[in-house]
Image (cartoon, rainbow, N blue to C red):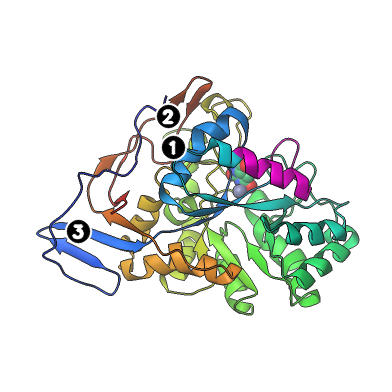
Amino acid sequence: MIKSLVLPCKALKFPSAKFEGSNQLRHKGKKMELTITRPDDWHLHLRDGELLQAVVPHSASHFARGIVMPNLKPPITTTAAAVSYRESILKALPAGSDFTPLMTLYLTDTTNPNEIKLAKRSGVVYAVKLYPAGATTNSQDGVTDLFGKCLPVLEEMAQQNMPLLVHGEVTDADVDVFDREKVFIDTVLQPLIQRLPQLKVVMEHVTTKDAVKFVESCKEGFVAATVTPQHLLLNRNSLFQGGLQPHNYCLPVLKREIHRQAIVSAVTSGSKRFFIGTDSAPHERRRKEASCGCAGIYSAPVALSLYAKVFEEAGALDKLEAFVSFNGPDFYGFPRNTSKIKLSKTSFKVPDCFSFPFGEIIPMFAGETLEWQPSFN
Ligand code: DOR
Ligand code: ZN
């Protein structure tokens, strides 16, 4: 049973003596509400089994579509596996949900270019994820040598207009963990886009000013980036605030404040190159609060409120809708959603945890007060 859900609250309706801003910002007295096109999540971990069952309602309640990451055990390396994983997700959705999972393949050293043709033809697989081997959760089957082993596959992807989604970190033990993204840009990403300029690339969960600069320097429409709520709201101090904070641990790891600020500036500038990707990555509490804790922050229940907080604090609420609802589908070549979601500026407390028969999951900002509660009209 979910303890207390941060979900649409029908009671939050404010009479419509309105102030119409460019982004449908209305207010009555001190109450504000913002109506925007329903967003999508372009980077999402839904897991499988009982965890999938537990978490998928949170994403489905706010987002219309989600790019579903393939790092299961075993990973989703074939179109056939992606089709079957998609069936499990659809089965796990709450009754009446119209959430659409957009499937991805997990790239390995042995992925065959023919698999890309099959993926494209399936009509349900929309991208291929590159995990450098050893970079993160369930990445042990990832790529060991992108240029040596994967060029034919990447060429086929460019041909098929199939985007490559990149976990942008090198894994060399002699590279400092805080420098892994920058070194990856210099040694892998930059050479890759020079070699295959027609390949669409999404640099996932950018964490540094270097990544922002890199994405801004690339050809618009070919290279873009997703941005998580944690990399917009937290810096690496949050890992050690009053003691070790396992629920703020994710990969790529949080960076210095100057990097957070650069990412906030990029997304609130109105650039089309950056879009929402929560990287919501649930792990059971006991697997986070452990001697070797898992990387991943569970943000799905509160992600929209967190992004709204970032844009409001930057004085850029008028740019929120493009970031969460337009830039992603425009990059992928999908139609924008037509339904709407309302964010009401009403305080609510984030649950301390979500309890399930198999264990607990701690959400991002657990126990804290947030505003901008989402609901449907
Ligand atoms: O923090 C993370 N968690 N980063 C990733 O790249 C993977 C994810 C997961 O699957 O738990
Ligand atoms: Zn991820």
Outermost residue, top side: 357
Quadrant of image for the N terminus = top left
Residue at image x 29%, y 62%?
A: 35
Front-most of residues 353 and 125: 125
Residue at image x 54%, y 28%?
A: 284
Distance of mark 2 from mark 3, alpha carbons?
28 Å
Distance of mark 1 from mark 3, alpha carbons?
25 Å
- Compared across the picture, whether 46 is left or right of 270 comes to right
Is 81 situated above or below 317? Answer: above
Residue 172 showing in the rendered view: no
Asked whether the residues under the numbered discs 1 and 2 touch, taking CB atoms below 8 Å apart as contact, a structural biologist would say: yes
Of labels 2 and 3, earlier in sequence is 3
Front-most of residues 232 and 226: 226
Whether ligand 1 has any atom under 8 Å from the Cβ at mark 1 is answered as: no
- Compared across the picture, whether 103 is left or right of 335 comes to right
Query: Could you classify mark 1 by the number of other residues whose Cα lies within 10 Å: few (under 14), some (14-19), or many (20 or more)?
Result: many
Quadrant of image for the C terminus = bottom left
Of the four image quadrants, the one with ligand 1 is top right
Which circle, 1 or 2, is nearer the viewer? 2
Q: Which residue is mark 3?
A: 32
Q: Which residue is mark 2?
A: 354
Label 3 secondary element? strand
